Image (tube, rainbow, N blue to C red):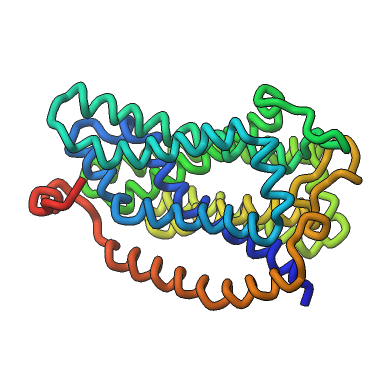
Amino acid sequence: MDLHIVWFVLWGVLWGVYFMLDGFVLGGGMLHRVLGRDDTDRRVLINSYGPVWDGNEVWLVTAGGATFAAFPTTYALMFSYLYTPLLLLLFALIVRGVSFEFRGKEDGALWKGCWDWAIVVSSFIPALLFGVAFGNIFAGLPMDEAGYHGSLIYLLNPYGVVSGLLFVLLFLEHGALYAALKSTGALSRRAEETAKALWIPLLVVAVGFLGYSNFATRLYDNYLAAPVFAVVPLLAVAALLAVRLFLAKGNTLAAFAASCATILGVVFTGVIGLFPNLIPSNLDALYSLTIYNSSSSDYTLRIMTVVAFVFVPIVIAYKVWVYRLFRGRVSAETLAGDHEAY
């Protein structure tokens, strides 16, 4: 078994699961003032993902840790080349967590209003930056023997912006569906209608992204070489269409599950297209970072594989338990009797 491939697959799975889980929190945060018409609605939204949002961050930490341990050269150069956007991303995630905790510490309208906007902005920035970063990785970075020749402005190229917009819309749709699933009454209906309205621009941008990728990247080379993998993007498209079908039938749970599959499908489509690259160079393939020229030693990969196969199932079991424990809907009535609520 080639452990380089094993860890490349695990690396993709970790990122996919993180986007699937934290995506609805980022989406809900961006919709915080749109769906939440008053303080009660906004408290319901925060408490719908309050018990799980910090646990979702474990997958982000694990994805970064797996990159560091399995592909240290990629980790070092990625955090060097993309230092500014990653720093902005980190600050935004910190502000988001602080906003959840601090919003309810005072009752003043100005106090809560400032934190409400902080939630919106600190949810939008990571969603956009994740999309821009992965879009540029898909297209390749300007790297040669002298290092990286880009800048923050360079990353905001047309393909990077389209990728960022795709991630923002994916998370907005995901967040609206989660809010519809976890809330009650008018708030739930408003979230469901928002999800229906967001689906059309999401479809347009998704189609544009797939077409643009044919010109801006080499992601499709692997699919042409091994057509069997084309099932992954086809399943992603089918899942996106299923979201609208289930919404039309009023089945919010199935629509949310289809949204989860859509996000996983988008991530895996990109990961399969990258193989064996982790960060390709768009100047000369000789300087691309691959799973072979940037990996740890075989001994390290073997030790990490044993650790992963022991602890990843434990983390999955714990997350399943947490989501099952907090599976109920959140309403104004449940918040009234919960002194631990946000």
Relative placement, left or right, of 33 versus 139 is left
Q: Position of residue 146 (x, y in %)?
A: 85, 34
- Residue 238 found in image quarter: bottom right
Q: Establish if 293 lies above or below 81.
A: below
Taking the spot 28% from the left edge, 43% from the top edge, the residue there is 45
Q: Position of residue 229 (x, y in %)?
A: 76, 62
Residue 255, visible in the rendered structure: no
Q: Position of residue 161 (x, y in %)?
A: 64, 29
- Residue 70 found in image quarter: bottom right
Residue 259, visible in the rendered structure: yes
Taking the spot 52% from the left edge, 42% from the top edge, the residue there is 170
Relative placement, left or right, of 101 versus 3 is left
Relative placement, left or right, of 5 versus 29 is right
Taking the spot 39% from the left edge, 43% from the top edge, the residue there is 176
Q: Establish if 239 lies above or below 146.
A: below
- Residue 215 found in image quarter: top right
Q: Nearer the viewer, residue 8 or 261?
A: 8
Q: Establish if 154 lies above or below 6.
A: above
Quarter of the image that includes the N terminus? bottom right
Q: Position of residue 77 (x, y in %)?
A: 71, 43
Taking the spot 77% from the left edge, 36% from the top edge, the residue there is 141
